């Protein structure tokens, strides 16, 4: 798994071919062409000459290979989407079969087996509490759908005054205008603030905020008190509360106690407010359970569920754009009427694309057939043990894990300027594709770790950290970090 492919077209780093002029020229040519013609996402293009894009020729398992033969471990799962490695044989086979059968048909007035089977299987994973899958293409679209469904549901029930939304400080839900309205990440939001609906923003339950002697559950309780006060004052006008369960990823992997989710469910029930779980990044096993919200229930308690679940990213295994929203029967029923305008008329051309749904079914097959969640627990313990030398390192703080997500924050006095960019570039030299968020270094690897690879990955992360911080110390770089904690660097998020 951790070894290089013997493919002669992709020689090992350091070989004659990898260092030869034509191959290097090809690498540089792709960079020049991309900079000239592709407007890259989440990127300040002014920095592209200093941080040129990494041209990737192919992927295999957790590895990505460039045109010069270099390999890179995909430490962030290509923006948190890749679950079982690149070019997975079983997902590939499922897609080839679907490609020869039915690549796509519109879902308005038609249906097809992959969409139906995917909706059925996801509903079954909630015990039938949630279902009626509404398909889209990306995470922000799923959030838009959930927000619209919530408001329209209340409106159809004669409560049109419930049109306000609540989100969590430093939360991230996407960058279309509706999703951005419930996002609180300054670098993404501020330029478009005049265009956005004004949401209520409440305290984050981020456990890093704990005072002396305070537990993560205590931080969650403090945050819930602010929600309770807001609901008491505005519940007649609030349609929904949206939350990233357990981990606010774009906030720098801000993790919170499951008690926060229990408290939210109770408050939303008490004050008649919809609860939207944005599981786009934390679902599909990433947080340790298939749905992160499964961890809301206390030991011995009945399962708790939100009113809407948004899924994307890992659901299609890193193959094709797909997102969806699951909702409750009573929400679905609120749209059933002879009047067309009372229906939920949201749509786009590739809704429920058969190829994307088939990829998702292949992902669910892997979970069922391989007991992925159990295997991930063992893998997580191995990588956690390999990262143990970081415990007590005075240069970092808040070393933490939730499921298959690891993170630590580099202390501000050590970070220096452009820390995320410097770490990213140093990571490339250590065979890592890794993109910190501000001062937060995090790992969200594909679910293919074994003990040997875990030891290798931890060693490369530590080597990258040592190298970057040694440079900061040697150069006397300003201790003022230009990447504020909790804010995403648009060049390296």
Image (cartoon, rainbow, N blue to C red):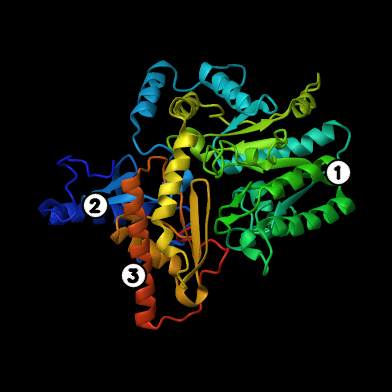
Q: Position of residue 203 (x, y in %)?
A: 72, 59
Instruction: Give the quarter of the figure containing the N terminus.
Output: top left
Quote the CA–CA distance across marks 1 and 3.
Answer: 52 Å
What residue do we see at 78% from left, 35% from top? 152
Element on which disc 3 rests: helix
Q: Nearer the viewer, mark 2 or mark 1?
A: 1
Residue at 41%, 16% in the rendered image: 101
**Within 10 Å of the Cα at label 2, are there few (<14), some (14-19), or many (20+) other Cα atoms?**
many
Q: Which residue is mark 2?
A: 70
The answer to whether residue 321 is visible is no
In this view, which residue lies farthest toward the left? 16
Q: Residue at x 62, y 38 (%)?
A: 310
Between discs 2 and 3, the one toward the N terminus: 2
Q: Which residue is mark 3?
A: 467
Task: Residue 151: give x, y in percent of width and height.
Answer: 78, 39
Q: CA distance from mark 2 to mark 1?
A: 56 Å
> Is tag 2's residue or tag 1's residue first in the polypeptide sequence?
2
User: Considering depth in this image, is 153 or 248 the residue closer to the camera?
Assistant: 248
In percent of width and height, residue 234 lies at 87, 51
Please give the residue where the numbered disc 1 appears in the rendered image: 271
Question: Element under label 2?
Answer: loop
Residue 192 percent location from the top left of the image: 64, 58
Q: Residues within 10 Å of mark 3 (few under 14, many from 20)?
A: some
Query: Alpha-carbon distance for marks 2 and 3?
Result: 20 Å
Q: Secondary structure at mark 1?
A: helix
């Amino acid at each position: 798994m951790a070894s290089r492919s013997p493919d002669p077209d992709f020689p090992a780093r350091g070989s004659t071919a990898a260092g030869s002029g034509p191959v290097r020229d090809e690498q540089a040519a792709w960079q020049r062409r991309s900079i000239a013609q592709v407007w890259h996402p989440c990127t300040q293009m002014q920095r592209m000459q200093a941080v040129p894009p990494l041209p990737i020729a192919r992927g295999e398992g957790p590895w990505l290979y460039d045109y010069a033969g270099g390999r890179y471990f995909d430490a962030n799962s290509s923006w948190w989407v890749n679950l079982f490695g690149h070019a997975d044989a079983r997902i590939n086979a499922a897609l080839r079969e679907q490609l020869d059968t039915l690549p796509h048909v519109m879902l308005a007035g038609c249906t097809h087996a992959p969409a139906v089977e995917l909706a059925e299987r996801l509903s079954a994973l909630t015990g039938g509490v949630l279902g009626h899958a509404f398909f889209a293409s990306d995470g922000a679209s799923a959030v838009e759908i959930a927000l619209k469904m919530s408001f329209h549901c209340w409106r159809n029930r004669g409560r049109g005054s419930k049109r306000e939304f609540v989100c969590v400080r430093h939360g991230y839900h996407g960058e279309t205008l509706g999703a951005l309205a419930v996002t609180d990440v300054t670098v993404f939001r501020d330029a478009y603030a005049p265009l956005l609906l004004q949401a209520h923003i409440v305290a984050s339950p981020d456990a890093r905020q704990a005072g002396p002697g305070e537990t993560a559950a205590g931080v969650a309780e403090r945050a819930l008190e602010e929600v309770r006060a807001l609901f008491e004052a505005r519940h007649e006008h609030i349609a929904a509360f949206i939350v990233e369960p357990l981990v606010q990823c774009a906030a720098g992997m801000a993790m919170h106690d499951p008690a926060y989710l229990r408290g939210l469910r109770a408050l939303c029930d008490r004050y008649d407010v919809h609860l939207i779980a944005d599981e786009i990044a934390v679902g599909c096993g990433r947080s340790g359970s298939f749905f992160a919200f499964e961890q809301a229930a206390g030991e011995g308690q009945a399962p708790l569920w939100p009113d809407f679940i948004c899924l994307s990213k890992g659901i299609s295994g890193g193959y094709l754009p797909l997102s969806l929203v699951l909702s409750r029967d009573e929400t679905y029923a609120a749209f059933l009427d002879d009047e067309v305008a009372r229906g939920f008329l949201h749509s786009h051309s590739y809704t429920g694309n058969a190829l994307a749904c088939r990829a998702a079914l292949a992902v669910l097959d892997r979970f069922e057939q391989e007991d992925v969640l159990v295997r991930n627990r063992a893998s997580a313990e191995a990588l956690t043990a390999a990262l143990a030398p970081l415990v007590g390192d005075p240069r970092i703080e808040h070393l933490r894990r939730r499921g298959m997500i690891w993170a630590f924050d580099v202390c501000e006095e050590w970070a220096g300027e452009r820390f995320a960019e410097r770490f990213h570039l140093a990571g490339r030299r250590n065979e890592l594709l890794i993109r910190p968020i501000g001062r937060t270094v995090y790992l969200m690897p594909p679910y293919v770790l074994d003990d040997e690879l875990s030891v290798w990955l931890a060693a490369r992360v530590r080597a990258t950290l040592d190298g970057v911080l040694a440079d900061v110390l040697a150069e006397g770089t300003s201790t003022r970090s230009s990447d504020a904690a909790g804010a995403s660097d648009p060049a390296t998020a």
